[in-house]
């Protein structure tokens, strides 16, 4: 006989885990099905391990800059095995904490296995057939392999396997100029590898303003990374050799290791969604409405698997929306929510709201405040002056529409701007605020003295 439950959650990511806990506390009999690791991509393969390794790379970078601060450090070398051990230890700490919490709770069962639909609200796993009133899909994404001739014969690295290297690549080739490619490219350059980044687009971070993308490229090149733009990889060989069309000519780029960072695809192909009649788009993402409901009653999709912004904080907010609507008697949707994000290169790029290009394309009357980080006292004191702050303001209402902070702790400064936006404050509230000196936040007083195109 089919086992009767209140809820089934497929995937234990940053939406699935807290949802399982909330449902269990509400007395709902819940099955949480996980085919790999508790915690999803963020804890195991994304935010936690990558930012741990970024921190190691930054230490190497600062050690080499010791003389700039009057500190003589001697030669700097990197022990990749120790870097890997540190990363693994932090991941295990986060993962095991979640596992223990789930396993100790009443009303929730953690099932290790691969669940698949066999009916609209029926899932099979490990020989068991489970029925539930509610089913939540939170199975995330995985790396996509680009259709390049010969790539199946090359030992590829992706965002997971590159973090398991026990040796330093002599020359790392990175395919892709998005977040994954840029973070790992700079990281391994700082560890000591030669790095070549190959990107098909005409600029990096193509969704950002041109001046932001250009400044990021400048920073990476200052760090010694070779950046090839409008570079189409035609074919590869087993010797980690790429044939690339770039600047109207074909060139051969040779490396010791190849990291593929050209995009991600949803983990929906093994869910047998057709058996439940669940609609997906042409890329395999689960279609949902503003309440995160699929076209099948009682079935929801949360996190990256539904498409849209693939960020941990968005997945967590998806959980809050579903919890509010199903357990708390409220009505929340995805409409109008802020989608902030931070690119953890060094210096960081913190982004929220509209870009200048987006604001102008909407026909808005805007003013753009822009100040180099050389104008920030705290940045000068720490000798971390690369980048700039850029804030887009509605010229009529004086409200902040968006911001890009490419600078030391750019994500933290961006978050302060976001809070002002959430509160509906005019830019003058930041400009006239009494902020502690000397902090990075103090720059919010001064950035609005620098309007582009105005005397």
Image: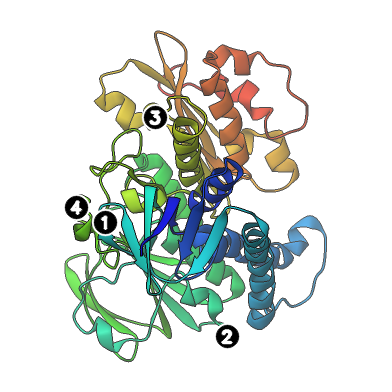
What crowding class fits label 2: few (fewer than 14 Cα within 10 Å), some (14-19), or many (20 or more)?
few
How packed mark 1 is, by other alpha carbons closer than 10 Å (few <14, some 14-19, many 20 or more), is some
- Label 4 to label 2, Cα distance in Å? 47 Å
For label 4, the residue is 277
* Label 3 to label 4: alpha-carbon separation: 23 Å
Q: Nearer the viewer, residue 107 or 204?
A: 107
- In the picture of the structure, the residue carrying the numbered disc 3 is 333
Mark 4 burial class by Cα count in 10 Å: few <14, some 14-19, many 20+: some
Task: State which quarter of the image contains the N terminus.
Answer: bottom left
From this view, report whether residue 295 is shown above or below residue 144.
above
Numbered label attached to residue 201: 1
Tell me which numbered mark, 3 or 1, is placed earlier along the sequence. 1
* Residue reaching furthest to the bottom: 239
Decide which of tag 3 and tag 4 comes sooner along the chain.
4
User: Where residue 393 sits in the image (x, y, percent)?
Assistant: 44, 19
Foreground: 422 or 44? 44
Q: Is residue 228 visible?
A: no
The reply to whether dot 3 and dot 1 touch (C-beta < 8 Å) is: no
Q: Which residue is mark 2?
A: 167
Is 81 placed left or right of 164 in the picture? right
Which disc, if any, is residue 153?
A: none
């Amino acid at each position: 006989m089919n086992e009767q439950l209140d809820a089934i959650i497929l995937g234990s990511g940053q939406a699935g885990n807290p949802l399982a806990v909330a449902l269990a506390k509400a007395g709902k009999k819940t099955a949480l099905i996980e085919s790999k690791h508790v915690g999803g991509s963020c804890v195991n393969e994304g935010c936690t391990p990558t930012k741990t390794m970024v921190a190691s790379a930054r230490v190497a970078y600062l050690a080499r800059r010791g003389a700039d601060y009057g500190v003589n450090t001697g030669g700097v070398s990197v022990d990749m095995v120790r870097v890997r051990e540190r990363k693994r230890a932090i991941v295990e700490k986060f993962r095991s904490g979640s596992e223990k919490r789930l396993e100790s709770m009443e009303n929730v069962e953690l099932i290790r296995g691969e669940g698949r639909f066999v009916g609209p609200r029926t899932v099979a796993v490990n020989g068991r057939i489970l029925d539930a009133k509610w089913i939540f899909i939170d199975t995330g994404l995985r790396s996509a392999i680009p259709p390049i001739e010969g790539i199946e014969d090359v030992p590829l690295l992706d965002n997971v396997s590159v973090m398991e290297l026990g040796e330093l690549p002599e020359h790392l080739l990175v395919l892709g100029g998005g977040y994954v490619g840029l973070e790992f490219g700079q990281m391994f350059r700082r560890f000591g590898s030669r790095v070549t980044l190959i990107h098909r687009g005409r600029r990096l971070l193509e969704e950002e303003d041109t001046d932001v993308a250009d400044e990021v490229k400048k920073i990476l090149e200052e760090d010694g990374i070779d950046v090839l733009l409008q570079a189409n990889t035609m074919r590869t060989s087993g010797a980690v050799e790429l044939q690339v069309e770039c600047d109207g000519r074909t060139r051969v780029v040779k490396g010791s290791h190849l990291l593929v960072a050209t995009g991600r695809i949803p983990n929906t192909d093994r869910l047998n969604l057709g058996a439940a009649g669940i609609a997906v788009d042409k890329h395999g993402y689960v279609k949902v409405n503003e309440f995160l409901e699929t076209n099948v009653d009682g079935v929801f999709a949360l996190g990256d698997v539904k498409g849209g912004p693939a960020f941990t904080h968005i997945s967590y907010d998806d959980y809050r929306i579903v919890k509010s609507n199903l357990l708390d008697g409220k009505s929340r949707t995805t409409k109008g929510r802020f989608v902030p994000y931070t690119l953890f290169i060094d210096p960081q790029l913190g982004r929220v709201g509209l870009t200048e290009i987006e604001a102008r394309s909407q026909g808005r009357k805007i003013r753009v405040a822009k100040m180099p980080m050389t104008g920030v006292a705290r940045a000068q004191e720490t000798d971390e002056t690369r980048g700039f702050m850029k804030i887009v303001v509605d010229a009529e209402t004086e409200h902040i529409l968006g911001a890009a902070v490419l600078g030391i702790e750019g994500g933290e400064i961006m978050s302060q701007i976001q809070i002002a936006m959430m509160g509906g404050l005019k830019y003058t509230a930041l400009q006239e605020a009494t902020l502690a000196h000397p902090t990075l936040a103090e720059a919010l007083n001064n950035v609005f003295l620098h309007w582009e195109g105005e005397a």
